[in-house]
Image: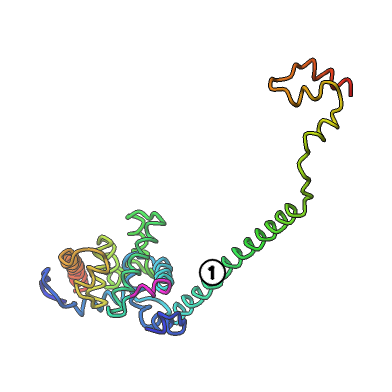
Amino acid sequence: MARAVAGDRSAFGVLVERYAAAVRRVARAVLGDPDDADDAAQDAFLSAFVKLRQYDPHRPFGPWLMRIAANAATDRRRRRAVRRAESLDGLRAWGPQPDAEAQRRDLGLRLREALAQLPERRRAAVVLFDVEGYSHADIGRILGIPEGTVRSEVFHARRALRVLLADWKEDVE
Amino acid sequence: MTPEPTPFDHRPDPVLGGALSRVLAPGDQAAFVARVMAALDDAAVAHWDVLASWARAGIAAAVVAVIVGGLLVARPAGSPASLEDVLAVAAGPAAPALVAGSTPPDPSVVLTSAEER
């Protein structure tokens, strides 16, 4: 970390390798479209490299980076002035869809649709909590919202996803 | 998945988390890392390009300043003309009155002086 802060690119490359998957997942949770998400993730890493001197080494690096990533994804969405409806279209367009009927029964597609129906902040909160394993307090700092709001967002997201996943199970059965 | 989620759950749901992780799974990791590092290099090159453009502008400004300064220094500095010199050049009966008078000259006097020259 110290080498990366000092401007060592190879050391920063190690950090990119370590956190790339998480940053891309969070960006994708916010933006939906995987290409947009990767662009935002790249913006986040470049921004992090520039801001590394502002990083407090006494604090964990992950939440600091995730805050930059969440902001980069949100900024990108705002810059492109993507309306919510278009964002939902993007989320639904994830991945190939060779057979709509078959895909409809697919858990992945159902989850994508379920995620697409959640507000952006709720999507980010549930992914940061259930996928990335951050605490409510950390997520509050990452998203810039109170811890209680994080709990509420995660709760509502889980409940919505659970309903849709239950529907999916009933379809399968 | 947790049977009945509450706002007070403080542990991640491994089933939901795993499913979401698969849905959000990014593509080729190595390609992405390479892309970020290449963008980092490009950003550094662009940074030096900006500095170089600033340096070019600075050099051009310095050259202009040197040329202007040189012209100012090299210009012959003539001593101011004395009153006698002026009167000698404007030799005529009306000239002293024109130069030394406390009131504005009469235009006819000026014209007459010019005609005499």
- Asked if residue A134 can be seen in this view, the reply is yes
Most common SS among magenta residues: helix
Towards the viewer: B35 or B101: B101
Q: In this picture, which residue range is highlighted in magenta?
A: A49-55
Residue A142 coordinates in the image, percent (x, y): 27, 69
Quarter of the picture holding the N terminus of chain A: bottom left
**Is B12 left, or right, of B42 in this rendering?**
left
Q: Is residue A96 above or below residue A1?
A: above
In the rendered image, residue A52 lying in the magenta stretch gets the answer yes
Colour scheme shown: rainbow
Give the labeled residue for mark 1: B47
Residue flagged by tag 1: what amino acid is it? His
Quarter of the picture holding the C terminus of chain A: bottom left
Q: Quadrant of residue A103?
A: bottom left
Residue B85 coordinates in the image, percent (x, y): 82, 35
Residue displayed at 16% across by 76% down:
B1
Residue displayed at 21% across by 79% down:
B15
Query: Dot 1: few (<14), some (14–19), or many (≥20) neighbours within 10 Å?
Result: few
Towards the viewer: A27 or A101: A27
Q: Is residue B99 above or below residue B40?
A: above
Q: Quadrant of residue A143?
A: bottom left
Secondary structure under tag 1 reads helix
- Asked if residue A167 can be seen in this view, the reply is no
